[in-house]
């Protein structure tokens, strides 16, 4: 009897609300009626047992109570099955509260019928409020992310549009006959522009990564081209710091691979660029190997430097965004702290891994492996076109081709006009905005239109739409090629959806520009001059770009030997002058000798030697010992050039 009393009091010892109800017949159909509530129910709802017993549980519900949840509960009771649900109810004061309610039928021992049910409710108001706050926070975060992406897209346009003009016009001036002093300034402008463009690209890549919009492509690319680009971009910066830069490629690395060549080059350049940045003495070595296995052929890359190294306590943070070893490094070396974070993400997107070893004041070695297959032969394109003449297109009468440029930035407009003239076009009209282009189109017919996408008043998308409406009446369609500095994913699709036919991304690349124009006017690039795939391997044993030498010789062996002999004679003389100037501390003579040697090396195609001499030209004020070190690097590189040239006999 005592146990029965204890059992009868158990419901009052729990904080959960306990309700026992029974099914009853009411007007309009069966319903439920409360027959028992515990103290937890009163504490939760504010209603006493006397106020609750005999009523339907509906008196706890209100305007925000989920109709769908109530229907699920009613169906469960009808089927005499258990159910767990979350329900919003209202207490005696009208305040909302959330419960997690668990309802179970109570079966009669004699008949197995379910006349009664037990409902246990637990207060989850605090948890639901936290969830609501989290949802609101996530929505705000998503809105902020979208706003940031929109801002970065706009910033991309605002920065890349003037960069297009800066880099394009700098390249045009570089190709002109100018003095060495002017060339030095133009080279500096171009180099600074490329650095700024690199920072912009890093920020855009980060935005794409965070928005999960960055994609890895797959196409056939030439390993040599990537390494040559890395060498061209790195040799000069290494030479300015008197650093050795070597590229070592194992013979088993395939000439052609199948993957995202641009992203692979970006990964390698980020690592090599960091190595140059954080190395003061010694050098950097880029090594490449290839493991051929049927299941997962792998490209192995290693970048080793003799730089400042990375303290142990910063190893775990190295691949974090905006992370450098300490703030003093940021002040001394600069940088956004994004390069390694982006590099790691790109490597992992390509299915690879990246790691490093480092010792303070002894250097760092980054190593990465990327699964990548050799390109099938049918994917390989063997011809590379080099434009060196004014009429760069053939197959059409360029005198009859008429082009319209719609571009609000005057420098970019000037650049595109120059490039079209370089291709051989004569009839070129320009418009500063969409309205001007519409006026021109009412009175003229064009073979193609180059359309800037972001313009004031009437942008490129709206202008294209108006042009397409006009053309419907004339039953014609003029090819419209978009020119946009917006590098965000989906921009090409947006241009095509607006009615454009093709897409060029700023800063414009002349090779891509030429190919695009040729396609839409039915022309072909003039391929009379082709660069040979050649035997030029990107390692320290091949220090001369033979394609430059061939510009002098045109393949004639006698002429080749004459040019080589002339170069070596002047080289010996320049080295003697440099040695004398170093011993006698003659700054002006040192600079003149380095300048002379620089020109001869560059014309021959000995670009690493050219870079060393270019750096030495501006180091006339160094001490005798410092010049000796610089001269030692020049001697070492010249020895490679000399041995290689003599081996061509």
Image (cartoon, helix red, strand yellow):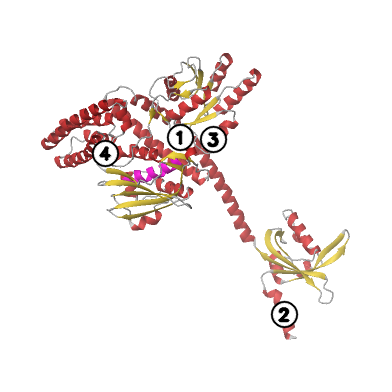
The local crowd at label 1, few if under 14, some if 14 to 19, many if 20 or more residues have their Cα within 10 Å, is few
- The vertical placement of 357 against 640, above or below, is below
N-term-proximal mark, 2 vs 4: 2
Q: Tell whether label 1 touches label 3 (CB within 8 Å).
A: no
Q: Quadrant of the C terminus?
A: top left
N-term-proximal mark, 3 vs 1: 1
Q: Label 3 belongs to which residue?
A: 491
**Is residue 530 left or right of 43 when viewed as pictured?**
left
N-term-proximal mark, 4 vs 3: 4
Q: Pick the residue in front: 135 or 371.
A: 371
Identify which residue is drawn at 26% across, 43% down. Answer: 243
Regarding mark 4 in the picture, which secondary structure is present there? helix
- The vertical placement of 337 against 87, above or below, is above
The local crowd at label 2, few if under 14, some if 14 to 19, many if 20 or more residues have their Cα within 10 Å, is few
Regarding mark 2 in the picture, which secondary structure is present there? helix
N-term-proximal mark, 2 vs 3: 2
Residue 325: in sight, yes or no? no
- Where residue 331 appears, x then y in whole percent? 32, 45
Q: Quadrant of residue 639?
A: top left
Q: Tell whether label 4 touches label 1 (CB within 8 Å).
A: no
- The vertical placement of 620 against 212, above or below, is above
Q: Quadrant of the N terminus?
A: bottom right
Residue farthest to the right? Answer: 27
- The vertical placement of 76 against 449, above or below, is below
The local crowd at label 4, few if under 14, some if 14 to 19, many if 20 or more residues have their Cα within 10 Å, is some
Residue farthest to the bottom? Answer: 1
Q: Label 4 belongs to which residue?
A: 240
Question: Which segment did they paint magenta?
Answer: 260-275
Identify which residue is drawn at 31% across, 32% down. Answer: 546
Q: Label 2 belongs to which residue?
A: 7
Q: Which disc number belongs to residue 381?
A: 1
């Amino acid at each position: 009897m005592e146990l029965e009393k204890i059992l009868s009091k158990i419901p009052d010892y729990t904080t959960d609300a306990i309700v026992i109800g029974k099914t009853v017949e009411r007007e309009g159909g069966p319903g439920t009626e409360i027959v028992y509530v515990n103290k937890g129910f009163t504490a939760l709802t504010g209603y006493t047992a006397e106020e609750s017993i005999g009523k339907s549980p509906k008196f706890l519900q209100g305007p925000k109570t989920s109709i769908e949840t109530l229907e699920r509960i009613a169906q469960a009771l009808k089927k005499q099955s258990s159910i767990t649900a979350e329900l919003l109810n209202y207490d005696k004061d009208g305040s909302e509260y959330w419960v997690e309610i668990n309802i179970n039928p109570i079966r009669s021992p004699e008949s197995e019928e379910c006349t009664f049910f037990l409902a246990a409710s637990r207060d989850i108001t605090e948890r639901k409020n936290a969830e609501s706050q989290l949802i609101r926070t996530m929505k705000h975060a998503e809105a902020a992310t979208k706003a940031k992406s929109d801002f970065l897209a706009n910033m991309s346009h605002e920065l890349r549009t003037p960069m297009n003009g800066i880099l394009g016009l700098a390249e045009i001036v570089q190709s002109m006959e100018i003095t060495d002093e002017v060339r030095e300034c133009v080279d500096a402008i171009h180099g600074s522009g490329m650095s700024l463009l690199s920072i912009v690209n890093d920020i855009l890549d980060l935005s794409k990564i965070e928005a999960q919009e960055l994609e890895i492509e797959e196409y056939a690319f030439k390993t040599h081209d990537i390494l040559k680009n890395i060498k061209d971009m790195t040799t000069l910066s290494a030479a300015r710091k008197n650093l050795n830069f070597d590229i070592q490629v194992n013979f088993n690395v395939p000439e052609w691979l199948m993957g995202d060549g641009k992203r692979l080059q970006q990964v390698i350049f980020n690592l090599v660029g960091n190595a140059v940045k954080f190395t003061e003495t010694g050098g950097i070595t880029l090594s490449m190997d290839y493991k051929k296995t049927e299941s997962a052929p792998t490209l192995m890359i290693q970048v080793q430097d003799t730089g400042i190294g990375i303290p142990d306590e910063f190893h775990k943070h190295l691949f974090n965004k905006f992370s450098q070893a300490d703030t003093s490094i940021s002040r001394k070396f600069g940088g956004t702290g994004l390069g390694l974070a982006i590099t790691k993400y790109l490597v992992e997107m390509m299915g690879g891994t990246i790691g490093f070893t480092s010792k303070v004041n002894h250097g760092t070695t980054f190593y990465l492996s990327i699964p990548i297959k050799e390109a099938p032969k049918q994917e390989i394109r063997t011809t590379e076109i080099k434009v060196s003449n004014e009429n760069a297109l053939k197959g059409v009468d360029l005198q009859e081709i008429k082009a319209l440029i719609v571009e609000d930035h005057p420098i970019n407009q000037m650049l595109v006009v120059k490039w079209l003239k370089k291709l051989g076009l004569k009839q070129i009209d320009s418009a500063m905005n969409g309205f001007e282009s519409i006026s021109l189109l009412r009175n003229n017919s064009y073979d193609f239109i180059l359309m800037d996408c972001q313009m004031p008043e009437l942008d490129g998308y709206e202008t294209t739409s108006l042009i397409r409406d006009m053309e419907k009446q004339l039953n014609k369609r003029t090819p419209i090629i978009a020119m946009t500095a917006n590098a965000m994913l989906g921009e090409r699709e947006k241009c095509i959806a607006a009615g454009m036919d093709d897409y060029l991304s700023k800063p414009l690349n002349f090779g891509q520009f030429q190919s695009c124009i040729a396609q839409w006017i039915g022309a072909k690039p003039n391929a009379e001059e082709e660069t040979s795939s050649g035997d030029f391997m990107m390692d320290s044993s091949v220090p001369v770009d033979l394609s430059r030498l061939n510009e002098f010789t045109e393949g004639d062996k006698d002429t080749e030997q004459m040019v080589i002999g002339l170069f070596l004679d002047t080289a010996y003389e320049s080295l003697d002058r440099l040695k004398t100037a170093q011993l006698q501390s003659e700054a002006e003579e040192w600079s003149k000798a380095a300048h002379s040697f620089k020109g001869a090396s560059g014309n021959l195609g000995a670009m690493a030697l050219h870079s060393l001499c270019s750096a030495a030209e501006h180091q006339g004020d160094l001490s005798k010992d410092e010049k000796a070190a610089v001269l030692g690097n020049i001697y070492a590189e010249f020895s490679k050039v000399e041995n290689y040239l003599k081996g061509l006999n």
